[in-house]
């Protein structure tokens, strides 16, 4: 859900339900490394509220577009980490002769 102003599309707050610090801090990190972002921060309204609010202010581009780009970048980073970790597990298992460890779910 976007909580922004119609007059100024470069400044918005986005609410993500069923999320926590994991997404909030990761997305804040990616957004703050984007040169189009003037300000980015996140908050969790209450510890028992499973929601993250992310505030994005840009230098000119619509905040919604910058957020979409950051989510895509974060997804690429996560895929790279998962792939690198999977290769490391395979290498470890091959050198140790361990067969019961896996990165995929056994169910």
Image (cartoon, rainbow, N blue to C red):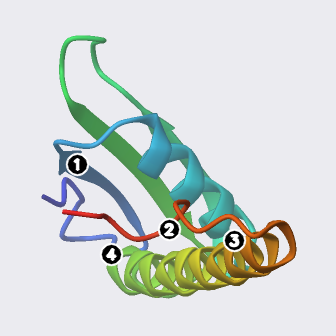
Residue carrying label 2: 103
Report the residue marked by disc 1: 15
From the top left corner, tell me how far across and down residue 47 is, in percent: 30, 11
Element type at mark 3: helix
Which of the two labelled residues, at mark 4 and mark 3, occupies the earlier sequence position? 4
Q: Are marks 3 and 2 in contact (CB under 8 Å)?
A: yes
Pointer 3 or 2: first along the chain: 3
Is 10 placed above or below 47 here? below
Asked where in the image residue 50 lies, by quadrant, the reply is top left
Q: Quadrant of residue 81?
A: bottom right
Label whose residue precedes the other's in the sequence (1 or 2): 1
In-front residue for pair 101/5: 101
> Between marks 2 and 4, how big is the CA–CA gap?
42 Å
User: Contact, CB < 8 Å: mark 4 with mark 3?
Assistant: no
Residue topped by disc 4: 9
| Classed neighbour count for the residue bearing mark 1: other residues with Cα under 10 Å, few (<14), some (14–19), many (≥20) | some
32, 57: nearer the viewer: 32
Q: Residue at x 22, y 50 (%)?
A: 16
Q: Which residue is mark 3?
A: 89
Comparing labels 3 and 1, the label whose residue is closer to the camera: 3
Q: Is residue 11 left or right of residue 1?
A: right
């Amino acid at each position: 859900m976007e909580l922004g102003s119609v007059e100024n599309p470069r400044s918005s707050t986005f609410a993500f339900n069923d999320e926590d610090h994991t997404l909030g801090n990761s997305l804040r990190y990616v957004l703050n490394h984007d040169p189009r972002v003037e300000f980015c921060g996140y908050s969790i309204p209450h510890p028992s509220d499973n929601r993250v609010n992310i505030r994005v202010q840009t230098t000119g581009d619509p905040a919604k577009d910058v957020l979409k780009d950051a989510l895509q970048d974060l997804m690429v980073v996560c895929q790279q980490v998962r792939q690198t970790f999977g290769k490391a597990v395979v290498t470890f298992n091959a050198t140790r002769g361990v067969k019961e460890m896996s990165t995929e779910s056994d169910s």
